[in-house]
Image (tube, rainbow, N blue to C red):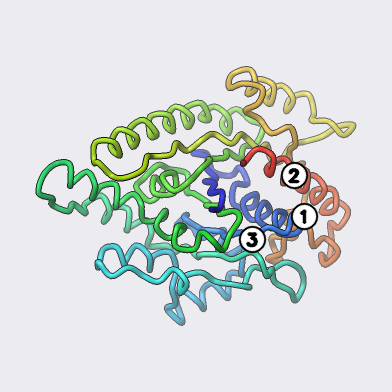
Amino acid sequence: MPKVVSMINWKGGVGKTTLTLHLAAGLALRHSKKVLLIDLDPQCNLSFLAIGASPYISHTYKKNLSTLKTIFDGYFDRNPADTADVILKQRVRSSAGKVFTNVDVILSHQELTLLDMKLAREKRSGKDHREETKFEIEKISIIKTVIDSVSEEYDYVLIDCPPNVNLVTQSAFFASDYYVVPAIPDFLSTVGIALINQYMDQFNKDYQSMWTYSGLPGSYSNTKFGGIIFNMVDEYGERPKKGHTKIINNTKSELGSNSVFKNYITDGDGISTASEMNLPVYAFKDLPRAQQNASKQADYMGEVVDEFITRIV
């Protein structure tokens, strides 16, 4: 079974999507792992980064091919989609003119925002309250069902979540073994992390109770906190600058020293330059500029990936 990880922060602009893609790339390049990316955000940024904006538009709107929306449509129509038809293989770019053979992706769709309202209205009648509880769990299990159907094919599944806790996002949490919080070392990026942890604790309690009440076989598995990865860290002398060190240390004091990854990603234009070309920063030799910064950020990203392997077990 793969390790399933939801990437979440209720604050936007923290580099969550870029980090998700680079974790997948690093797991593939450094550890020869097979990874499935799932873009759950209606903004579709991970989809754009992974395969390119023009190919995404062609796939989704010109050719009307399958995306994550196809999976949810199958649920509403009571005609489940074939997961194999939704997964794009060998389309995520690894370097100039090359793609990853061991990183696949399920693309997002802008209409996922509307699907959440549709999910909220979807009520299936049962013979009693217990059966209706089973139907509610079935509704929140949509992403889990997709992952379970291809579980033998992957070592990791990384889900890029939108900055909210609507029903579509909850389906990612329900499917996940862990949640990881990307953050930048500023007040607004970190102030809500304790609330995320509180929310997830209650989420686990609620669904543990629902599972037990419904009489479903087996047991509900809690979604565990995998840690905080700091991004866009300013350095001086190969250490975070004083202001960023203070925020990182405050976060450790509030949430526990082990709550924060020891490794972090530095600020710089290497990752942004790579993203403009739909490449991971590891392909820094293919960049027209910022190669030195990209090489440094690739090294830091690699250390984060190595720590990720040890934490997500």
Residue 52: percent from left, percent from top: 61, 69
**Amino acid type shown at disc 1:** Arg
**Amino acid type shown at disc 3:** Lys
The span from disc 2 to disc 3 (Cα, nearest Å) is: 15 Å
Question: Do labels 1 and 2 touch, CB within 8 Å?
Answer: yes
Residue 226: percent from left, percent from top: 58, 36
Question: Do labels 1 and 3 touch, CB within 8 Å?
Answer: no
Question: Earlier along the polypeptide chain: callout 1 or callout 2?
Answer: 1
Q: Looking at this rendering, what residue extends furthest in the front direction?
A: 217
The span from disc 1 to disc 2 (Cα, nearest Å) is: 8 Å
Q: Residue at x 58, y 72 (%)?
A: 89
Residue denoted by label 3: 34
Residue 51 location, quadrant: bottom right
Residue denoted by label 1: 30
Residue denoted by label 2: 306
Q: Secondary structure at mark 3?
A: loop
